[in-house]
Structure formats: C-alpha cells, structure tokens
C-alpha cells in the first residue's frame, strides 16, 4: 500500500486475486500532514532591515526570517485535515487538533492521542467539548448565574 499524505488515508492495493483491498483509516501519530512551505532562505530584508510579506494586501514585516515564516503559515495554512471529505486547513498543528476534536469527534475518539475530553460547568453540570466554552457559557447562558451581574 502506498500512503497518500494529502488525504491521510492509505491507497487501496491489489491483493493476490486482483481485487482492491479496503483502505485503512488514517491514524494520528502526533502530527498532521503539512504541505511544504515556500523556501525563504534567498529572501533578503528590505531597506528598513525587515523581512516583508509578499502576499497581496498584507503589510506584515518581521525582524527575522523565522518570524516571517511563522507569519506565512497564516496565509498558506499548510496543516490539512485528515478527513478526506473535509477541506479544512490550519496554520498550526494545535488549530487542527482543536478542529478534529470539535468537528470529527467520533474519529478523534478512535485516536489514542486525540481523545475528546469533556469539561463540565462546575455550577450547573452542563457538558462541553472545550474548556473555553465553559467560560462563555457561565457568562451568557448558565441557568445558575442567569440574571446576575456579569463583568
């Protein structure tokens, strides 16, 4: 079988009888597939000593190539969702982790390193997939604090 890093799934291979074997589902091993980024080693700083982003409409500039490369990830979004029917891309690995744990829960729960943890409101017990949702819930919709003054 040959792996297709773009979709994250293995490509079917013919077995001894000439039939295609069933593809196996992508297994998360700690990193999602990333497309290559442009090589910026030959880029020189501008007359102001800064490295300028060349993307249309972007005026970002940085002190070093490393910082420019990190910024360019926001334009290129090299991290690809492993689900073939999902076109989501992200600038960073942690963004894709959050995406699959929110949008592909069943798949994420099959991955030992990605299992979705549930968080609960300590006031009313409501369940949430992300800890930061509890703060929003307590501020705007928790039945226990509803009607109280919020900061």
Image (cartoon, helix red, strand yellow):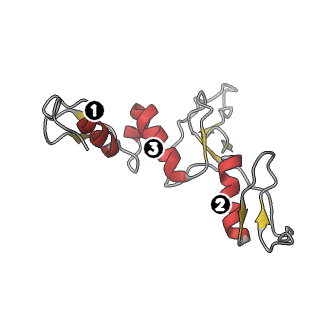
- The 10 Å Cα crowd at callout 1, few under 14, some 14 to 19, many 20 or more, is few
Residue 140's label in the rendered image is 1
Q: Find numbered disc 2 in the image and state the secondary structure of the residue it sits on.
A: helix
Q: Residue 39's x, y, as percent?
A: 80, 62
**On screen, residue 127 above or below 117:** above
Q: Nearer the viewer, mark 3 or mark 1?
A: 1
| Closest to the observer, 130 or 22 | 130
Residue at 19% x, 39% y: name it: 121
Compare marks 2 and 1 and give the one earlier in the sequence. Answer: 2
Query: In which quadrant is the N terminus drawn?
Result: top right
Q: CA distance from mark 2 to mark 1?
A: 35 Å
Q: Nearer the viewer, mark 2 or mark 1?
A: 1
Q: Find numbered disc 1 in the image and state the secondary structure of the residue it sits on.
A: helix
Q: Which residue is mark 3?
A: 98
Q: Quadrant of residue 37?
A: bottom right
Q: Residue 4's x, y, as percent?
A: 68, 41
Q: CA distance from mark 3 to mark 2?
A: 19 Å
Residue at 81% x, 46% y: name it: 56
Query: In which quadrant is the C terminus drawn?
Result: top left
Compare marks 3 and 1 and give the one earlier in the sequence. Answer: 3
Residue at 49% x, 52% y: name it: 94
Q: Residue 74's x, y, as percent?
A: 65, 50
| Closest to the observer, 110 or 70 | 70
Q: Which residue is mark 2?
A: 70
Residue at 54% x, 40% y: name it: 26
Q: Is residue 28 visible?
A: no
Q: CA distance from mark 3 to mark 1?
A: 22 Å
């Amino acid at each position: 079988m040959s792996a297709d890093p773009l979709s994250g799934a293995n490509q079917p291979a013919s077995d001894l009888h000439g039939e295609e074997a069933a593809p196996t589902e992508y297994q998360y091993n700690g990193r999602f597939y990333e497309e290559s980024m442009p090589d910026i080693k030959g880029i020189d700083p501008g007359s102001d000593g800064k490295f300028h982003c060349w993307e249309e409409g972007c005026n970002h500039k940085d002190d070093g190539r490393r910082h420019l490369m990190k910024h360019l990830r926001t334009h290129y979004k090299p991290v690809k969702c492993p689900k073939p029917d999902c076109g989501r891309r992200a600038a960073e690995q942690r963004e894709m982790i959050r995406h699959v744990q929110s949008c592909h829960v069943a798949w994420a729960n099959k991955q030992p390193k990605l299992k979705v943890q549930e968080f609960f409101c300590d006031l009313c017990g409501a369940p949430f997939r992300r800890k930061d949702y509890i703060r929003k819930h307590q501020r705007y919709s928790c039945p226990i604090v509803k009607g109280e003054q919020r900061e």
